[in-house]
């Protein structure tokens, strides 16, 4: 892979990572609720989901998903319903008040946070559409595909890790404004509503013109 190709991919990957989506909403939500350190587990899950999507697209399965109306609609519906479920869970999340009277959302286990991040990215049809549309343009047919895929995957995940931690850090820096139970409940409802809105929007995602 030439340096020029790689740099172009870095720019493209940075734009995708920064553009707000379900991963960004989740990172901000968990960053505000649990702090950056504990949100790292959620972000790790997001990266694992991103890797699966990358390799699905790279292996050509993504093209098959886009070519098949039924398969695409199944993935889209599962992704949308999962985000709506996540949003609903966030909306209804219990608020714990510590001894110092500071309120906080009840912390899910590390395993649960990793799984939430993973499922958020792996069921995102927009991610699959993007990877299928963009990845082939950076892969040279004349060279072995796997090493190129690995370079792109490491690059993409590194950028996404930095961006998602930045979102989590920005949100966690607002924690001091969300100390009482009412404020935490409002925050949960705001992010829960956002996740439900992103989930609902997925129902309107169409297969790209490049499908097939």
Image (cartoon, rainbow, N blue to C red):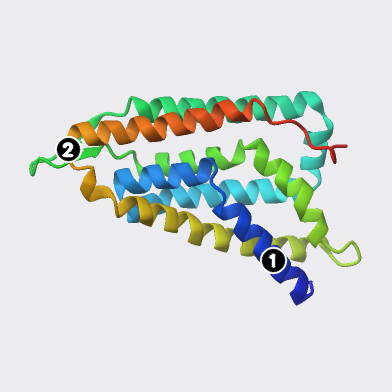
- Label ID, residue 151: 1
Q: Nearer the viewer, residue 118 or 19?
A: 19
| Quarter assignment of residue 199 | top right
Q: Residue at x 82, y 37 (%)?
A: 64
| Dot 2 crowding, Cα within 10 Å, few <14, some 14–19, many 20+ | some
Identify whether 1 is placed above or below 204: below
- The answer for how far apart the CA atoms under marks 2 and 1 are is 45 Å
Front position among marks 2 and 1: 2
| Dot 1 crowding, Cα within 10 Å, few <14, some 14–19, many 20+ | few
Q: Position of residue 184 (x, y in %)?
A: 25, 36
Q: Residue most toward the right?
A: 142
Secondary structure type for disc 1: helix
Secondary structure type for disc 2: loop
82 relative to 207 in the view: left or right = left
| Quarter assignment of residue 81 | top right
Instruction: Verify CB contact (< 8 Å) between mark 2 and mark 1.
Output: no
Q: Residue at x 73, y 41 (%)?
A: 129
Q: Residue at x 35, y 55 (%)?
A: 36
Identify whether 129 is placed above or below 181: below
Q: Quadrant of the N terminus?
A: bottom right
Q: Which residue is mark 2?
A: 180
57 relative to 189 in the view: left or right = right
- Label ID, residue 140: none
Q: Residue at x 74, y 60 (%)?
A: 149
Q: Earlier in the sequence, mark 2 or mark 1?
A: 1
Does residue 114 appear in this view? no
Q: Nearer the viewer, residue 57 or 174?
A: 174
Does residue 122 appear in this view? yes
Numbered-mark total: 2
Q: Position of residue 12 (x, y in %)?
A: 68, 59
Q: Position of residue 147 (x, y in %)?
A: 75, 66
Q: Quadrant of the C terminus?
A: top right
């Amino acid at each position: 892979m030439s340096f020029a190709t790689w740099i172009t991919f870095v720019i493209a990957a940075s734009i995708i990572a920064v553009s707000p989506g379900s991963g960004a909403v989740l990172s901000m939500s968990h960053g505000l609720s649990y702090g950056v350190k504990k949100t790292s587990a959620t972000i790790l899950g997001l990266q694992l989901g991103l890797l699966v999507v990358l390799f699905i697209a790279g292996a050509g399965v993504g093209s098959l998903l886009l070519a098949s109306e039924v398969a695409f609609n199944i993935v889209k519906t599962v992704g949308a319903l999962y985000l709506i479920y996540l949003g609903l869970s966030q909306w209804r999340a219990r608020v714990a008040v510590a001894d110092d009277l500071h309120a906080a959302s009840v912390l899910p286990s590390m395993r649960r946070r990793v799984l939430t991040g993973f499922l958020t990215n792996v069921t995102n049809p927009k991610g699959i559409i993007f990877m299928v549309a963009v990845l082939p343009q950076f892969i040279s047919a004349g060279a072995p595909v796997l090493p190129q895929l690995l370079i792109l995957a490491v690059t993409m995940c590194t950028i996404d890790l930095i961006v998602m931690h930045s979102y989590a850090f920005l949100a966690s820096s607002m924690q001091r404004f969300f100390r009482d139970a009412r404020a935490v409940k409002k925050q949960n409802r705001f992010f829960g509503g956002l996740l439900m809105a992103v989930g609902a929007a997925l129902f309107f995602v169409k297969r790209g013109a490049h499908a097939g």
